Image: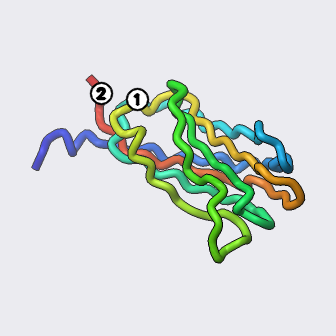
Amino acid sequence: ANPACAQASSVDLSNTTVTNIPDGNATGITSVIDVTASGLVSSLSVSVDISHAFRADLIVKLVHPSGAEVTLFNQEDSDEYLNLVRTFTPPEFNGLEVKGAWKLIVIDNAAQDSGKLNSWRLNAQIVPGN
């Protein structure tokens, strides 16, 4: 067994503040999860629970404390129109420091249908940094 594996730990935090998403607004909303643990991300998952009448309006981005940004969902059309309840596993943050304020940005890029962010969860496996 690799001794480094024994030192791995995890961060599992949620923000459950329900926030209305402004309709047809390119700025959207920003929700923050502040991670106090320290270490390097070895794997990361982000779960979102968004109520929305037409989820193809939505753009969802995750922003690392450094400012690095990854788009998780970009107005994808599918057979499912209602709500966006999904877990994403973006590899782009692997190797980065986990500590700091992570931001989830949710944008409703089209008028008419509106929704709200019910909650989101950040789950990261971390290994000790140097």
Residue at 77 percent of width and 40 percent of height? 26
**Structural distance between the alpha carbons of marks 2 and 1:** 8 Å
Q: Which mark is residue 116?
A: none
Label 2 packing within 10 angstroms: few (<14), some (14-19), many (20+)? few
Please, is residue 6 above or below residue 56 in the view? above
Residue 63: percent from left, percent from top: 56, 35
Q: Are marks 2 and 1 in contact (CB under 8 Å)?
A: yes
Q: Nearer the viewer, residue 106 or 118?
A: 106
Which element type, helix, strand or loop, lies under badge 1? loop
Q: Three-letter amino acid code at disc 1? A: Glu
Residue 70 locus on image (x, y percent): 52, 41
Q: Is residue 92 left or right of residue 111?
A: left
Residue that mark 1 sits on: 97
- How many C-alpha atoms fall within 10 Å of the one at disc 1: few (<14), some, or many (≥20)? many
Image location (x, y in percent) of residue 111: 86, 54
Residue 13 in picture, x, y percent from top left:
55, 46
Indicate whether 23 appears above or below 7.
below
SS state under label 2: loop
Quarter holding residue 39: top left
| Residue in the picture at 57% in, 41% down | 62
Q: Which residue is mark 2?
A: 129
The amino acid type of the residue labelled 2 equals Gly
Query: Toward the viewer: 19 or 111?
Result: 111
- Point 12% across, 45% down: residue: 2
